[in-house]
Amino acid sequence: MTPYDILKSPLWLAEIASPAKSFAANPILGNRRLNERGLHRARVEIAARMAEARRKRLAHRVDAADRAAYDRDGFLVKENFLAPEAFKRLRAEVFGRTFPAREMRQGRTVTRMVPLPASLLASMPATREVVESPFLRAAMHYMSSRAGEPTFFIQTVLAEAQGRKPDPQTDLHADTFHSTVKCWLFLDDVGPDDGPFRFVPGSHRLTEARLKWEYEQSLHALETGGHTALGSFRVKEAELSALGFGDPVAVTVPANTLVIADTFAFHGRTPSPKPTVRVEINGNLRRNPFLPWTGLDPLALPGIRFNQMTLNMAWADFRERRLGKRNVWRDVGETAADGPVRV
Ligand SMILES: [Fe+2]
């Protein structure tokens, strides 16, 4: 142990009861002996039990049909989410102008992100209507089992069909070890060749088989490396039936469809056979799965609300400058949401 390790060990210990997921970044979470004794399995099981208790308290805000769809599938699909006029206004706000943007490359796919701070939302009323939608927020709260402030941004997925390494997000995976939610309001149609989201229905539920699989993965996560070592486990399609699941479904949707998904379930992007550009309003909500209460989110405080992503990026840039830790989200200056790749 180095002096640095000794200094960090209380933090690593505290992270056991936090959303921290990386086996590589935390030697306690990544400790093979502790995981043989069930550390990871216990985190998964306790988090699921607590999520269920919190979710019951949030259920009254979501209608019965949506609750049933989530309980069955782990995701909700709402076509024609906005009224036609509101959707037209949303597209007019997003397209035909430039925004300060970030880009991240993962193999042959680039994700562009345009943060939506309060100052920008003030001039984008249709976009603001989406991110403040009571329906969307209630569904995100219920599915993630935490009330709180989601983070929203404009996201563009730019997939090249060939070259470079494959996109790691095309592997079926769980984002983390507990229920957490993401949403996408698609501004364009997403057909079968446009790299649609795919999802294994029902795989958001923690079954005995899934718990056993989580345990087995935890024993080898560090050696497996890649995103698995970072705590986002990959599942092979051939493993799905033994886990009690069917095949993944491709979520092909017309423009103006909202998809909300619990990304503890197995999901991924479908590889694109052709270059594609897909623009969406994206949101996510991931909070500490080990807290008993549902609300009390510091991100909802005035000054922070809507500005989380801008603040995160400023912090990540500072870490890069001062500590040499590269920010994967590269500042690409002003660009159109559907403009060409810069990274
Ligand atoms: Fe994911």
Image (tube, rainbow, N blue to C red):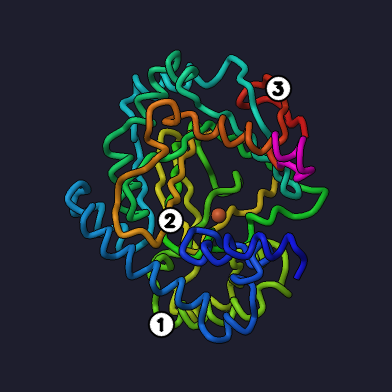
Q: Is residue 187 left or right of residue 167?
A: left
Mark in the foreground, 2 or 1: 2
- Viewer-closest of 125 and 177: 177
Q: Amino acid at mark 3?
A: Gly
* Rendered image: mark on residue 165: none
Q: Is residue 323 magenta?
A: yes
Quick check: is 103 in the magenta stretch?
A: no
Task: State the extent of the magenta-drawn residues as a range.
Answer: 318-327
Left or right: where does residue 173 sit relative to residue 289?
Answer: right
| Residue visible at 38% across and 69% down in the picture | 205
Give amino acid for label 2: Asn
Disc 2 residue crowd, few under 14, some 14–19, many 20+, Cα 10 Å: some
Q: Which mark is residue 288?
A: 2
The residue where tag 1 is placed is: 208
Assign ligand 1 to one image quadrant: bottom right
Residue at x-position 77% and y-position 66%: 2
User: Where is residue 51 drawn, in percent x and y?
Assistant: 33, 62
Q: Nearer the viewer, residue 196 or 183?
A: 183
Q: Position of residue 314 (x, y in %)?
A: 63, 31
In the image, what residue occupies the spot 38% across and 27% down? 302
How far is disc 2 from disc 3 in space, using C-alphas? 33 Å
Q: Mark 2 or 3 closer to N-term?
A: 2
Q: Residue furthest right?
A: 163
Location of mark 3 (residue):
333
Secondary structure at badge 1 equals helix
